[in-house]
Amino acid sequence: MEAPQEKKPVFFPDEGYWTAEADGLHLIGSRCTKCRQNFFPPREVCPKCFPEGFEHRMEESKLSSRGKLYTYSIVQVAPKRFLPPYALGYIDFPEGVRVLGQLTTSDPAKIKIGITVQTELGRIAIDEQGNEVMSYKFRPL
Ligand code: ZN
């Protein structure tokens, strides 16, 4: 008989997509060295400059730890292994990037379009082995 496996959190995407600092979690994207456009998740090639060739490069770009809620929805019927109800929103960062993610709140009445949110780590789902799946989330301030 096998011993029960210890549950441990897994990260999705992997931890290379963010960095924790004193003022909170910062997502790590990429920036085009030619047109200065930021992207998250990071891209290998800038889709704006691509038609002009590959001579320019992408560099790492750290997003602010706070952004503004562009819009959101309360998810009542979720994909397998997600834990509804939860709020899913698009966050606009000062770097010109819009990111989709779950909002951290037990009170949906606190969620309003335009509010400031703080990026943080939190559980977004449970995997097939019963481990918590941790990822970036956005907490209304
Ligand atoms: Zn570009």
Image (cartoon, helix red, strand yellow):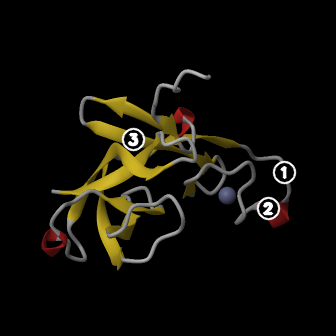
Q: Quadrant of the N terminus?
A: top right
User: Within the displayed image, which quadrant is ligand 1 positioned in?
Assistant: bottom right
Identify the residue at horizontal 28%, vertical 38% (top origin).
24
Q: Provide the secondary structure element on which disc 1 rests.
A: loop
Q: Residue 50: which numbered mark, if any?
A: 2
Q: Nearer the viewer, residue 124 or 24?
A: 124
Identify the residue at horizontal 44%, vertical 45% (top origin).
135
Label 1 vs 3, first from the N-terminus: 3
Pointer 1: what residue?
54
Q: Residue 26: which numbered mark, if any?
A: 3
**In the image, is the residue at mark 2 within 8 Å of ligand 1 by its beta carbon?**
yes
Distance between the Cα atoms at labels 1 and 3? Answer: 28 Å
From the viewer's perspective, tell me whether residue 4 is left or right of residue 48: left
Provide residue 105's location: percent of width, then percent of height.
21, 60
**In the image, is the residue at mark 1 within 8 Å of ligand 1 by its beta carbon?**
no
CB within 8 Å, label 3 to label 2: no
Residue type marked 1 = Phe
Residue type marked 3 = His
Q: Nearer the viewer, residue 96 or 28?
A: 28
Label 3 vs 2, first from the N-terminus: 3
